């Protein structure tokens, strides 16, 4: 970088010359991402300001300009769609709070188990990754099978344990979100375990040895050594989970279908139907921008929440 | 000799209750491991068991009817679901579509990622930092945000230029290439960072151009990482649902969305679906196992370094 051999042009010229090659190298990737990501973001915003529907989509740039009407329709809690949208935001938040925290707790517990040497550890570590590796459509289809009322495993076991008298309907109505949560936690904790295990292994052993000498209990060691040491890992892990959670689509689409019903509708499934079944592309775009805004807001709130605690601890 | 034995006996006597407690602890520990494995494996066992059940058994199963409860061991194991996997749902066509799209994505994405990763690792070009950040941040935004305008763009291009992109292989490969690029290029860049720059300098002195260095030095040395990135792209395209459910049609439907066809409003073919599910997951699990180390290291370092 910036090394100049004798007898070459001045630094800035040389740097630009070398940069030209760099720009050429990234050009294909830039074009690709421009057309699939950056471009659509801008067009998406333009679409959200127009009445783009099944009739006007062919010539969307000349679709009637409606200003913020699409946003009003998507947001108005009194309207049919707005009410549904707010509900879907609540659903995905509730879903996220439960699945993210439980996946984290289970992941943390399993990471501690896997951090100990034992017979067959390599094999167990490999097997534990299976839920994470399995394609979403396969995993959630299997869970859909497991949650069937009459032929499913869940009802069979609940009946056997005497917890229920009659088979429960899991995938329709108010219980459906819990079925999806169960499946999502099953699929989600291995990644948490993996990341936390890597975090655990980077904590110096001497810290624990010193704590044992000082007579610290197991809980104290966890509370005052493990948790603070894992704080940076936890922060990114939870933040990524929150961001992904707002985009949740696969688990709901595969387990509950195109319309998961009021109790389990999430923004992505709602927007999908609004855009590709009702063909209200304008309203769909407006709602997806609102979704992005919520994602950003949560990111900021979360980062703020963590800031003062760090200052108190006085990290190096 | 004898003093040693005495000392040994003393320790043994002293630590007997401690040892008993240790054994109990050890047993409990292995029970916990067994519990973890059970939780992980039950859905897979249920999937495999379902794939060997007859349609009759699955349809007449009932948690309330004794003798007909669903169970893990099929009552009359059959291969019918595997043999007839293509009969009601054209699963083999979907498999072919997925193979073409995923392989295409793998080749295109890896090539573009190698070029960009080399540039990021070896050149200090103006605008590099914002570029890397913007690439990374696209991964955090909801997919649905891009899907609607992207679909509208496809329709518009078709309308005005007569080029059909929806439900075509190139259209899907292009889409998925863009999805896997961020992770692929950053992972390759960090791998290329570990290749000593002295090799570049040496080659440059020997008269190699920048592209020559890329293909003669960097490419052969980054093979492990290239394999990992390629397989990552393949798996990503194989598994993707959101865009595939809108942009693929009868010509290009992939296995990830095709799998859902086994359940219609008229009929639920669970046996066929489970057999197809087994077939769909096998390539992914196999490929992932090959490059487990690299992909996991990439993901974990992404999460830990943030």
Image (cartoon, rainbow, N blue to C red):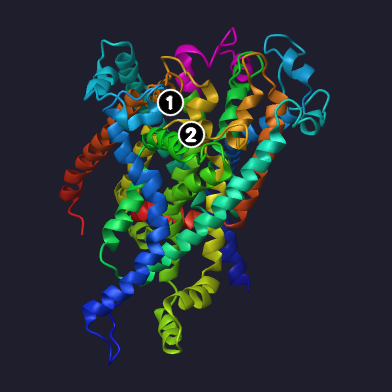
Asked if the magenta segment contains residue A159, the reply would be: yes
Name, please, the residue furthest toward the bottom.
Answer: A7
- Circle number at residue A253: none
Q: Mark 2 falls within which chain?
A: B
Q: Would you say A260 lies left or right of A159 here? A: left
Percent coordinates x, y for residue A178 in the rendering = 46, 21
Q: Mark 1 falls within which chain?
A: A
According to the picture, the residue beneath numbered tag 1 turns out to be A272
Q: Would you say B251 lies left or right of B54 here? A: left
Q: Would you say B22 lies left or right of A71 here? A: right
According to the picture, the residue beneath numbered tag 2 turns out to be B242
For the N terminus of chain B, the quadrant is bottom right
Foreground: A226 or B151? B151
Asked if the magenta segment contains residue A158, the reply would be: yes
> Which SS class for mark 2?
helix
Percent coordinates x, y for residue B52 in the rendering = 77, 29
Classify residue A80 by image quadrant. top left
Chain part drawn in magenta: A156-179
> Which SS class for mark 1?
helix
């Amino acid at each position: 970088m910036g090394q100049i051999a004798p007898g070459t042009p001045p630094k800035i010229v040389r740097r630009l010359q070398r940069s030209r090659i760099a720009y050429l190298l990234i050009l294909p990737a830039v074009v690709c991402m421009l057309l699939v990501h950056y471009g659509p973001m801008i067009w998406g915003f333009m679409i959200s300001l127009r009445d783009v529907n099944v009739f006007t989509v062919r010539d969307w740039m000349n679709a009637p300009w409606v200003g913020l009407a699409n946003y009003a329709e998507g947001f108005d809690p009194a309207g049919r769609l707005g009410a549904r949208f707010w509900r879907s935001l609540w659903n995905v938040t509730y879903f996220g709070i439960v699945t993210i925290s439980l996946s984290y707790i289970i992941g943390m517990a399993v990471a501690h188990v896997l951090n100990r040497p034992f017979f067959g550890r390599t094999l167990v570590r490999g097997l534990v990754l299976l839920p994470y590796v399995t394609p979403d459509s396969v995993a959630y289809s299997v869970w859909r099978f497991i949650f069937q009322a009459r032929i499913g495993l869940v009802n069979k076991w609940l009946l056997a344990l005497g917890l229920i008298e009659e088979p429960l309907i899991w995938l329709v109505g108010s219980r459906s979100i819990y079925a999806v949560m169960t499946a999502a936690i099953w699929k989600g904790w291995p990644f948490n375990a993996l990341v936390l295990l890597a975090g655990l292994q980077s904590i110096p052993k001497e810290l624990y040895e010193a704590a044992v000498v000082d007579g610290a209990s197991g809980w104290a060691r966890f509370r005052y050594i493990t948790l603070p040491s894992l704080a940076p890992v936890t922060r990114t892990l939870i933040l990524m989970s929150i961001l992904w959670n707002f985009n949740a689509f696969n688990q709901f689409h595969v387990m509950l279908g195109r319309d998961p019903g009021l109790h389990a509708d999430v923004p992505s499934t709602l927007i999908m139907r609004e855009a590709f079944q009702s063909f209200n592309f304008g309203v769909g775009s407006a709602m997806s921008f609102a979704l992005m805004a919520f994602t950003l807001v949560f990111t900021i709130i979360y980062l703020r929440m963590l800031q003062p605690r760090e200052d108190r601890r006085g990290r190096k | 000799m004898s003093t040693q034995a005495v000392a040994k006996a003393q320790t043994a006597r002293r630590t007997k209750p401690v040892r008993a407690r240790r054994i109990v602890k050890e047993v409990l520990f292995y029970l916990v491991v067994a519990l973890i494995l059970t939780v992980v494996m039950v859905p897979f066992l249920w999937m495999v068991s379902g794939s060997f059940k007859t349609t009759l058994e699955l349809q007449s199963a009932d948690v309330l009817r004794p003798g007909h409860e669903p169970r893990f061991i099929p009552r009359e194991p059959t291969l019918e679901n595997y043999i007839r996997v293509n009969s009601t749902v054209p699963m083999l066509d979907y498999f072919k579509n997925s193979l073409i799209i995923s392989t295409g994505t793998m080749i295109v994405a890896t090539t573009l990622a190698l070029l960009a990763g080399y540039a990021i690792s070896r050149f200090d070009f103006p605008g590099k930092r914002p570029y890397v950040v913007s690439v990374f941040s696209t991964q955090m935004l909801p997919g649905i945000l891009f899907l609607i305008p992207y679909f509208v763009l496809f329709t518009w291009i078709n309308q005005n230029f007569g080029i059909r992109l929806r439900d075509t292989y190139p259209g899907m490969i292009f889409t998925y290439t863009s999805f896997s690029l961020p992770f692929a290029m950053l992972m390759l860049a960090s791998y290329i960072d570990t290749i000593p720059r002295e090799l570049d300098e040496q080659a440059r002195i020997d008269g190699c151009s920048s592209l020559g260095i890329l293909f003669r030095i960097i490419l052969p040395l980054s093979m492990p990482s290239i394999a990992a990135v390629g397989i990552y792209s393949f798996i990503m395209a194989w598994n993707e649902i959101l865009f595939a459910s809108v942009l693929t049609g009868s010509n290009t439907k992939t296995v990830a969305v095709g799998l859902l066809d086994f359940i219609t409003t008229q009929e639920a073919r669970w046996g066929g679906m489970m057999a197809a599910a087994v077939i769909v997951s096998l390539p992914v699990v196999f490929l992932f196992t090959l490059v487990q180390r690299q992909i996991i290291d990439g993901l974990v370092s992404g999460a830990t370094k943030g």
